Image (tube, coloured by chain):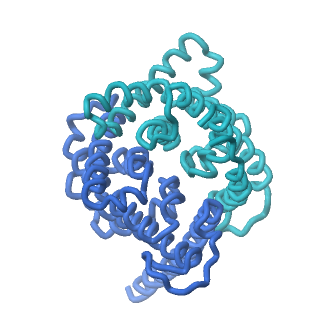
Chain colours: A cyan, B blue
Amino acid sequence: MNILAIVVAGILSQNFLLVKTMGICPFLGVSKKTDASLGMGIAVTFVMVLTCLVCYPLYVWVLVPTGLEYLEIIVFILVIASLVQILEMVLKKFIPGLYSAMGIYLPLITTNCAILGVAELVTVQAAVTTYLEALVYGLASGIGFTLVMIIMSGLRERVDRYNLAKPLKGFPIVLIVAGFMAMAFSMFTGINIGA
Amino acid sequence: MKIKDIALDGVVRQNPVFRLVLGTCPTLAVTATALGGFSMGIAVTFVLVCSNVIISLLRNVIPDRVRIPAFIVIIATFVTIVKMFLECYIPSIAQLLGAFLSLIVVNCIVLGRAESFASHNPVGYSALDGLFMGLGVTGALTFMGIVREILGNGSLFGAQLWSFKITFFTTVGGSFISYGLFIALFNFLYNVIDRKMRHVHANKALSKEVQA
């Protein structure tokens, strides 16, 4: 698979939120305001790239040669939790501006399906074959995540003002709107670049 | 605290899937078929019961500051056990659930119960809480799977019923929309029944007062 195909797949045709349905909790929880969505998206993208950066070599060069593949879940979740912790401390110390922009979303990311999902996909599920592809995949997936978060927040600012039937208010209407977006995104699966 | 309360909370009042809207990712991804929903529910139930028991036993040992990493490691252990078991004995189910089997670790339901219930309740209650929450999840996922499989594929647990099908319900878009409608329906029914029950209780209390 070439790099361009991975970028398109990560952002559109294999979008984490609307095609793979991973990372739906922040999608429903933090998509009320556009700037909050952007902050969450940037934080997720950052951690996704870092996760690919660490988990791919760890799995391919350490766990597989030593025959410890079955420990993958525990290893990945610990790596992600400590990455998030370290990132939080580093940002707080060196880039306080960025920290205050995405600070409150960082701790939530540890239990975001999309992060562990990306780690699983680039290693166990073998969605990519080389280290570089894994990094590009992480970055593209994060951008795709951010894109959908921002679109959703724009839609929600309108949807929340409509006078809906009471049982539909809140999560149900957001899920239904997301359903229509997913229908639109499913059309992107037709894109096929030198697979 | 009564067992009846724990059971009602888990299955109806705080149903993790329909009331609290937690653990949405597997709900959307695996309920295209009834078997997918059911097996995911059972896997989550097992992890919930086991992790609740262990966390409850260790609740006085785990220091408060590192409790979340400790919980996650305990949960990850049981998810690994489930995954290894399924891959060895029922590989077809492991394949059906795919990456979402490993993703039980980051399912908010499991960590949520560890944090809000098992970390400050005795072992017996924690086990029951895990069991009933798990049953609530299993029931909800199986129900969604049954409806989506019948509508989307005309079959039930893999057995073909008729040839009429609306394939839309098995797609991702269909999963979002049917999940949204299910939550709306559940909330509607819950509110209606809740109001009726309160009415009945109020009437009972009133008639008791009158008699007294």
Q: Residue furthest front?
A: A194
* Left or right side of B12 for B173: right
Image quadrant in which you'd find residue B44: bottom left
Q: Nearer the viewer, residue A190 or A147?
A: A190
Q: Nearer the viewer, residue B117 or A143?
A: A143
In the figure, A120 relative to B3: above or below? above
In the figure, B173 relative to B61: above or below? below
* Left or right side of B14 for A163: right
Image quadrant in which you'd find residue B67: top left
Q: Residue furthest top?
A: A94
* Left or right side of B63 for B168: right
Task: Give the residue drawn at x 40%, y 84%.
Answer: B208
Task: Give the residue drawn at x 27%, y 43%.
Answer: B77
Image quadrant in which you'd find residue B89: bottom left
In the figure, B103 relative to A44: above or below? below
* Left or right side of B9 for A137: right
Is residue A134 in view from this perspective?
yes
Image x and y of residue A30, in percent: 63, 43
Q: Quadrant of the N terminus of chain B?
A: bottom left
Q: Quadrant of the C terminus of chain B?
A: bottom left
